Each structure stands twice: as structure tokens, then as C-alpha cells.
Image: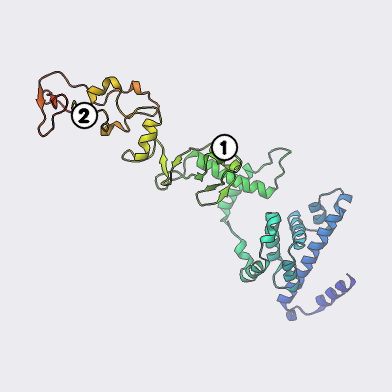
Amino acid sequence: MRELRAAISVLEAEDDDFIDLRELSSLIDRLQGKLCRVVAAARKRGEHLLAGQSPCSWVALQCQMSRTSAADRLCVGEELAHLPRIAQALSSGEIGFQAASVICHLSEQIGEKRAYIEEEDWIGFARRFSIKDLRYLTHEAAGGAALKSALESLSRPLGADDGRTSKQRRADSLVELVHHAMDRGTLPRRNGVRPHVSVHTTIEGLKGELGAAAAHLEGGMPISNKTVQRLACDGSLHRVLKADSMVIDVGRAKRTAQPAQGSPRNHGAGAPAGPPPDLRRAWLRPADRDDQRPPRRLLGRRRAHQPAEDDPPLLPPPPPGPRRRLPGRARGREGGVHPARPAGHDQAPVG
């Protein structure tokens, strides 16, 4: 430390106009890396416990910096031990301290999966891109103040057991703010529907059964079954059948009844495909067989929750009167004739 102080004294005595700015910045970054390793070692020794403070507060007090900067130094010092190539690049001046800090925070978030980080690629990214590329979600003064006020109203701790940091609470409050806007239904429509989140899952995944396939969002991002169950508590379910992904939904926006909708709505709901037995002769022509197809308008006319015996007949019984022969029709078991209806009567189709 004495040699370092002496070297700094010599440096301060030199003329500022003849000092290489890039080399000076690289030396300062090397010292910042050394400081991070020192504070990480002090935390492992438990020196903050002697003062009765948290590691972050103790480092902020000793180094005369904010708690945010102290937390950053602690994180970098802890993660540099797991990223030897990043530590070497910082010491040699290949990357700056801020770039190393970004990589170390990423390593902290992914935990044990840090082994999958390609350190050489990240060093290349740090040399290629500027730190200003990390500045995102910027607003003008009025918009930023409005967003800050809204987030602060939702980012309060939820009791003594809430262990989230202030950053995590603000991030969660932003998600909560979006959910409030979507639940109110006041957002503009897009393609005829309100903004919503689509989740694709299976019955096994919705039940949370062991070995069920993972659910995924509309963009393909996988999510856990617990998240699916939470979203399903306040959402609409659409059942998908077979490989053509035909949705079975009574409220599906189609101009005509779809083939996949006829079977579950009539057969699956317990309703027969034809009329009740006591009305069969009023529905069918005398020349028809019982095994022929039902009328075309039969499908889609019965509600899935309505009992079959409560259904009114689609065609009323023919009124009594003289019978006439239909031209071009073969004789059936009863002569192939139909009762004639009065003139001007609105005759419905019989087949």
C-alpha cells in the first residue's frame, strides 16, 4: 500500500496534459477489481458482524459510497472468483469495470448455470458495444415522473416476510400495473380482441401431474405449471382437439357451424342426432328411411345444455288436407305422396 500511495503521489505531480487518459482509466478499473475482491473477502471473514451491520451497509460506510455502489462491488468481487477469464480481462485492460460488472450481475442471476456462459463471447461483446447500449426504458421528465409515481404506489413491501429488494419490488409493480390495465378492458383492440396473454398447456399440465409437458406462452417461452394454474384462475379456457387445432367453443366467431363443433355440442352433450322418436314421422317424409341423414339445419339448433326432450321440432307437422304426388320422386312404402298445403303457406324445406 505504501508503494501504491507513493506511485499515486508521483502521478498526481505530473502534468495533466501529458497523461494518457485511456491508460489511466484502465489502471483505475484494475484497482476497482482489486477493491471488489477485497470487500468480498472481508464479507467472508464476517468483519461486518463485528460492527453489527449488513455487508452492504458496512462496505458503504468503509468505502464512503452509496449502498447501491457497495452492493455492486460485493457482487463483482463474489462473481469474479467464478469467472477467471473475465477477471483476467479486467486486470489486463481488455474490458472496463462497468462491462465486467454487467457480466458479473448476469452470472449472479443465473447461479449454477454460469458454467454455460461463454466468457470469450462476453468479452467480445464488451469490447464491441458501448455501455450506453445498456441504458434503456428512458422517458422524458413528465412521463418518467408519472411512471415513477405509479410504480411507487405498488412497490411497497408486503409485510415483514417480504424479502424482495427494492429493484425487484419495482419490477413486480410494473407487471402489476400492466395487469391492472389489461383487467379493466380499456386498452385498444387489436385484430378485434383486447390485449391478452395466451398460454398453451395440456390437461395434465393444468392439473400439475408429475411428468406433464411444460406449458409455453404464445411466443414459445416455457413456463412452469404453477404459473399456468395461477393464470388459469382468471382466464378463459379453449379446448383444442386433434392435430388441426380446432377450438371447441360455443362462442367461436364463425359464420357457419364447423364440423368439429357439431359432434361435441350434440352427441357429447347427450343430445341425439335426430328428432325424438314420437316426432320422427312428423319430421321425415314417408319415403325416407330411419337410417338416413337428419335435416341439415338440425346441427347447431340445440343448445349443449338443453335437454333433448325440451327441443321444439324444427318442422311443424303437416296440416290435414288432400295429398298430392311429388313429381320426379320414386314411390316409397306409402306411395311417395305428401300432404298438400294451403296456397300461400310458407313451406319449409323437407330435406
Task: Check residue 151 in the rendering and tell me which mark sits there, or answer none.
Answer: none
| Nearer-the-camera pick, 155 or 119 | 119
Which residue is the site of mark 1? Answer: 207
Q: Is residue 95 left or right of residue 236?
A: right
Rendering quarter of residue 157: top right
Q: Is residue 310 left or right of residue 47?
A: left
The residue labelled by disc 2 is: 288
The image shows residue 130, relative to residue 290, as above or below, that is below
| Identity of the residue furthest to the bottom in this view | 18
Mark 1 and mark 2 lie on one chain; the one further toward the N terminus is 1
| Count of labels in the image | 2
Quarter of the image for residue 348 reads top left
**Which corner quadrant holds the C terminus?**
top left
Kindly identify the residue that appears in the image at 74 percent across and 81 percent down. Answer: 18
Residue 63 visible in this rendered orientation of the protein: no
Q: Name which residue lies at 32% across and 30% down.
A: 273
Q: Residues within 10 Å of mark 1 (few under 14, many from 20)?
A: few
